[in-house]
Amino acid sequence: MTPRHAQYLAEIGIPVYALRSPPAASHAPAGTFEAVAARAPVAPPVAARGRDIGASMDLEALAREVAQCTRCALHRSRTQTVFGVGARDARLMVVGEAPGAEEDRQGEPFVGPAGQLLNAMLAAIGLARAEVYIANVLKCRPPQNRDPQPEEAAACMPYLERQVAMVEPAAMLAVGRIAAQYLLRSEVSIGRLRGQVYRYGERATPLVVTYHPAYLLRSPIAKAKTWDDLCVVKELLGRP
Ligand code: SF4
């Protein structure tokens, strides 16, 4: 680990412990991707429910369509849609739940304190925010930040599926229970969804689940588990 990464870990609140002596074994220790993948179930691919939505559009055209969307009742209360942001050829796609108040105001996902923590989490594995693609399950803010309703997610997920199909990331990171459950079509708790590598969509993109930065701000003790998840992402991306 470089001093720079140690600094990033300190910034996101994860203590770094140094080994007193180097490990003797050369095989992969428990917790690496090899160990995780060996015991990980593969979720069935998610059907391309959004194939008919924006199939012939590029990201910019899809964003313009989303900006006009009235497919669910959330269009009535939004300030603006929050489509997504990041590199068109990103190798990592981060998926969250829905815009909050600040995202609704700025039109960009993961801004404010939770966004700053996400940036620090990405930096800890050597990624700048601009290198990844960030989007949410919902493109409009639910009133009072309530959980998305199933019919809202069903109406909006096709947009996300088109974004995944166009960006073609090498790996995905679902942050928070809501994003993980909708992406994996599961009702299992996030505590049980963590620690495994799933396969998402027709391209069977590796998908890792971790806690939402907003939760980590309230429960810093969970940061160590999030660091484990980020290390799996780093290995999936083949980063040193
Ligand atoms: S949440 Fe999604 S489906 Fe609902 S109005 Fe907004 S963009 Fe359309």
Image (cartoon, rainbow, N blue to C red):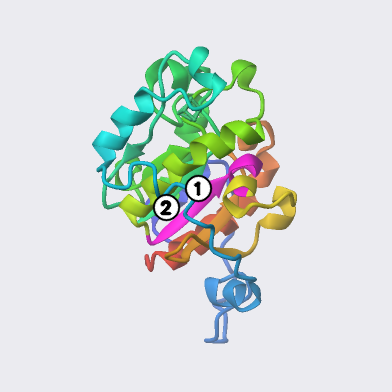
- How far across and how far down the image is residue 146, in percent? 66, 23
Quadrant where the C terminus sits is bottom left
Q: In the image, what residue type sits under mark 2?
A: His
Does residue 143 lie above or below 196 as drawn? above
Q: Does 187 sit left or right of 236 as displayed?
A: right
Does residue 161 lie above or below 137 as drawn? below
Q: Are marks 2 and 1 in contact (CB under 8 Å)?
A: yes
Label 2 sits on residue: 5
Labelled disc at residue 168: none
Magenta stretch? 170-180
Q: In the image, what residue type sits under mark 1?
A: Leu
Does residue 150 lie above or below 106 as drawn? below
The structure residue drawn at horizontal position 49% and vertical position 44%, both measured from the top left corner, is 95
Q: Is mark 1 within 8 Å of ligand 1?
A: no
- How far across and how far down the image is residue 61, in percent? 25, 35
- How far across and how far down the image is residue 227, in percent? 56, 53
**Circle 1 sits in a helix, a strand or a loop, which is it?**
helix
Label 1 sits on residue: 9
Q: Does 87 sit left or right of 222 as displayed?
A: left
Within the magenta stretch, is there residue 172? yes
Within the magenta stretch, is there residue 28? no
